Image: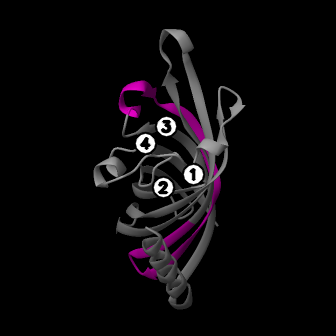
Amino acid sequence: MKKIFLAAIAVMTFSFANAQQTSFGVKGGLNLSNWSGGDARDNTKALVGFHVGGFAEIKVIEKLAIQPELLFSAQGTKIDGGGFLGDFDVKTNYLNIPVLAKYYIVDKFSVEAGPQLGVLLSAKADGEDVKDGFKTVDFGFNLGAGYHFTENISINLRYTIGLSPLSDNADIEDEGDYYDSVKNSVLALSFAYKF
C-alpha cells in the first residue's frame, strides 16, 4: 500500500512539473462513517461527522486532473454495547491526504478515484481517550463523482473504502484475517469552492 501511495505522489509531482493549469480551493461537508469487517457488521451503526480542508486541481490534459487534498475528518461509529453497556460513540479525528485522478466526462460532471493516507489525531470512546488502541496511520481508497455548477462551485459525493485494520492489536495471521479485520468506511458529501 505504501508503494501505491508513493507512486501516486510521484505522479502528482510529475503533474506539477507538466501541468497546463493548477487551481486551488477549499471544501467541506458531511461524513456518514462506520466500521466494516469483523464483528463491526453486527454491532455498529453509522455516525454523522464532518470534514473540512483544501485541495489543488492540477490539469494534466483537458479532461484529466490530479487532485491532492488535505482534510480534517471527523469519523467513527456508534457501537451497540448490549443491555449491560448500552450504546456509545467512538469518535476518531483524522488528517486525511487523498490523491485523486479526476476525469471530466463532460464539462459539469467528473468522476474520481485514488488512494488516501490518514493520520489519526484523536480517538475517544464515550468521551474517554482510546487513541492507544488504534493505528496511527490509516490507508483507504476513494471512489467518487462531482457535479460542477460553475467553474468555481461544485458538489461531490465520495466513498472511502478502508484498506488497513483500525486496531493496533489486530490479530492478523493470514489473508482471511486481514480481509475480515475492522476498517474505516466513510461516505462524504462535499461542497467546494475553487479560486
Per the rendered image, the range of residues in magenta is 39-68
Distance (Cα) linking label 4 and label 3: 17 Å
Sequence-earlier tag: 3 or 2: 3
Question: From the image, which quarter does the N terminus lie in?
Answer: bottom left
Q: Is residue 36 above or below residue 10?
A: above
Mark seen at residue 32: 3
Measured from the top left, where is residue 189 in percent x and y? 49, 45
Q: Secondary structure at mark 4?
A: loop
Q: Please give the name of the residue rendered at 58% of the width and 27% of the height, measured from the top-left corner.
A: 89
Sequence-earlier tag: 1 or 3: 3
Quarter of the image where one finds residue 26: bottom right
Q: Is residue 117 left or right of residue 108?
A: right
Spot the residue most to the top: 83
Spot the residue most to the right: 128
Distance (Cα) linking label 4 and label 1: 12 Å
The amino acid beneath tag 2 is: Phe
Sequence-earlier tag: 2 or 1: 1
Measured from the top left, where is residue 120 in percent x and y? 63, 51
Q: Which residue lies under the disc numbered 1?
A: 135
Q: Disc 2 or disc 1, which is closer to the eye?
A: 1
Q: Disc 3 or disc 2, which is closer to the eye?
A: 3
Of 161 and 122, which appears nearest the observer? 122
Is 67 magenta? The answer is yes
Mark seen at residue 182: 4
Q: Secondary structure at mark 1?
A: loop
Q: Please give the name of the residue rendered at 50% of the width and 19% of the height, measured from the top-left corner.
A: 81
Of 2 and 12, which appears nearest the observer? 2
Q: State the predominant SS element of the stretch in magenta.
A: strand
Distance (Cα) linking label 4 and label 2: 37 Å
Question: From the image, which quarter does the C terminus lie in?
Answer: bottom right
Sequence-earlier tag: 4 or 1: 1
